[in-house]
């Protein structure tokens, strides 16, 4: 059975001092989470401080993006070895804010995925359609295109080290979450693509998270869906108690036998 994964995406929130405080409050509540894997993705500037606070706990550390080169003349960017040095184990890639605000292309995201894997970081590739694309009936086409392009050239072994996150753009930061059945439909579709890209075993082992306005009150309804293996939480992950509640509810719902 796939265990639930709950990842907090702090986005561009938190000075080092604030991040330390939040990380400590999360650790106090979730030092050894049961029945779920937990990670947080603070801003780059707070990674070292948060890493020190989480050391020895079962809470993982991730980054919100990375460049594809190991080093070089890329002003303002961050390379994978800079992240692993600080204890990062995972990295979000292709988040909708990177795609839509910063115009990252599928090709660039694919290079980032490859670089992350080369350095032992587990990439969480984010895919999702806009409201207009959903209205036009293009949801499956969009997420399939983003997955195939984002994973282009990966070996099955590399694919097995990745996670996916389905994050409909219209649900991110809006308070309007996808319904669990809307999300489950897309997760099921993505699992079919995984089967095609790799194997049935791969499709059954890769974790697919849902993200977009996940809150303590709706988290369990996603985790109860057999094809939803956890949640990627933005706004609600900035509150330690709320985040711990989400983890607890997902862990409980995710370990309840499904169907
Ligand atoms: P949200 O963000 O939970 O604030 O909607 C989710 C995300 O962007 O990963």
Image (cartoon, rainbow, N blue to C red):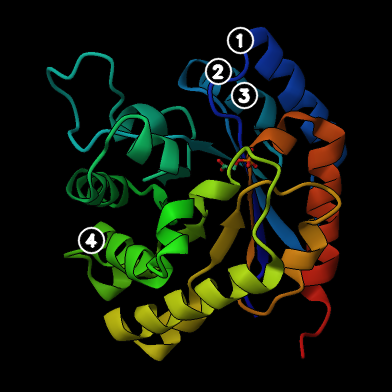
Q: Position of residue 96 (x, y in %)?
A: 43, 43
Q: Are marks 2 and 1 in contact (CB under 8 Å)?
A: yes
Q: Looking at the image, which residue is at 78% across and 52% down?
A: 247
| Label 4: which secondary element | helix
Circle 2 is placed at which residue position? 46
From the viewer's perspective, is the residue at label 2 or at label 1 nearer?
1
Horizontal arrangement in the rendering, residue 254 relative to residue 117 (left or right): right
Q: Position of residue 117 (x, y in %)?
A: 30, 52
Q: Does the image show residue 127? A: no
Give the spatial CA distance, label 1 vs label 4. Answer: 35 Å
Q: Mark 4 Cα within 10 Å, few/some/many (few <14, many 20+)? A: some
Q: Position of residue 152 (x, y in %)?
A: 20, 64
Q: Looking at the image, which residue is at 37% across and 78% down?
A: 194
Circle 1 is placed at which residue position? 15
Q: Are marks 3 and 2 in contact (CB under 8 Å)?
A: yes
Horizontal arrangement in the rendering, residue 107 relative to residue 136 (left or right): left
Q: Is residue 117 above or below residue 62?
A: below
Give the spatial CA distance, label 3 vs label 4. Answer: 32 Å
Give the spatial CA distance, label 2 vs label 4. Answer: 31 Å
Circle 3 is placed at which residue position? 50
Circle 4 is placed at which residue position? 149
| Label 2: which secondary element | helix
| Label 1: which secondary element | loop
The quarter of the picture where residue 97 lies is top left
Give the spatial CA distance, label 1 vs label 3. Answer: 11 Å
Q: Looking at the image, which residue is at 85% across and 58% down?
A: 249
| Label 3: which secondary element | helix
């Amino acid at each position: 059975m796939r265990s639930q994964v709950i990842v907090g995406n702090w986005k561009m929130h938190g000075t080092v001092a604030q991040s330390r405080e939040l990380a400590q409050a999360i650790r106090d509540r979730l030092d050894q989470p049961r029945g779920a894997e937990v990670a947080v993705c603070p801003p780059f500037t707070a990674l070292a401080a948060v890493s020190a606070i989480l050391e020895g706990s079962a809470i993982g550390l991730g980054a919100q993006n990375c460049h594809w080169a190991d080093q070089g003349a890329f002003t303002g960017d961050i390379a994978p070895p800079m992240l692993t040095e600080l204890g990062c184990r995972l990295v979000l890639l292709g988040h909708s804010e990177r795609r839509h605000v910063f115009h990252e292309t599928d090709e660039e995201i694919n290079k980032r995925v490859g670089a992350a894997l080369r350095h032992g970081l587990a990439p969480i590739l984010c895919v999702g359609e806009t409201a207009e694309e959903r209205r036009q009936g293009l949801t499956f086409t969009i997420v399939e295109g983003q997955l195939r392009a984002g994973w282009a050239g990966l070996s099955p072994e590399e694919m097995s080290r990745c996670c996916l996150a389905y994050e409909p753009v219209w649900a991110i930061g809006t308070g309007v979450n996808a319904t669990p059945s809307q999300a489950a439909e897309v997760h099921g579709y993505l699992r079919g693509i995984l089967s095609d890209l790799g194997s049935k075993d791969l499709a059954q082992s890769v974790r697919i998270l849902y993200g977009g306005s996940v809150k303590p009150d709706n988290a369990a309804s996603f985790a109860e869906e057999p094809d939803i293996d956890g949640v990627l939480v933005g706004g609600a992950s900035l509150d330690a108690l709320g985040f711990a509640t989400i983890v607890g509810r997902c862990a409980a719902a995710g370990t309840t036998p499904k169907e």
